[in-house]
Image: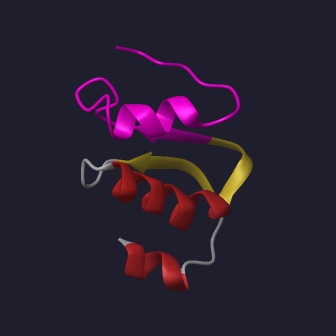
Amino acid sequence: FAEAAQTWTLPIDILHIDGFHSYEAVSQDFANWAKFCTEEAVILFHDTVSFPDSIGKFFNELKGYKIHIP
């Protein structure tokens, strides 16, 4: 997944982050791919409730408009 981001050039409207369940992994996935998202893009995070100390923590630290559906 990280390797694909190195050569990616197209804008992204919907990004689904669902990889390794560690804070570091989700943080890196976000850093690698969010820069390609359009201003109107939607970014979906999976397992924010199941992994509150990693994915959930990263999600909660993000600034901006968010919807959390448990």
Q: Is residue 9 above or below residue 63?
A: below
What's the magenta bit mostly, secondary-structure-wise? loop
- Residue 4 percent location from the top left of the image: 42, 78
| Residue 31 figure quarter | bottom right
Residue sticking out furthest to the right: 39
Confirm whether the magenta stretch covers residue 48.
Answer: yes
User: Left of 41 or right of it: where is 27?
Assistant: left
Looking at the image, which residue is at 50% across and 50% down?
15
Q: Residue 10, how many percent across, how many down?
A: 63, 71
Q: Residue furthest top?
A: 70
Point out the image quarter for the C terminus.
top left
**Magenta stretch bounds:** 42-70
- How many numbered discs, if any? 0
User: Residue 64 vs residue 68: left or right?
Assistant: right
State whether residue 65 is above or below residue 40: above
Q: Residue at x 49, y 35 (%)?
A: 59
Q: Position of residue 42 (x, y in %)?
A: 59, 39
Q: How is the image coloured?
A: secondary structure
Provide residue 45's location: percent of width, then percent of height: 41, 38
Q: Residue furthest front?
A: 53
* Residue at (36% x, 49% y) in the render: 23
Q: Residue at x 35, y 58 (%)?
A: 25
Image quadrant in which the N terminus is located? bottom left
Eyeballing the image, is 4 above or below 66?
below
**Quick one: 47 or 36, which is closer to the camera?**
47
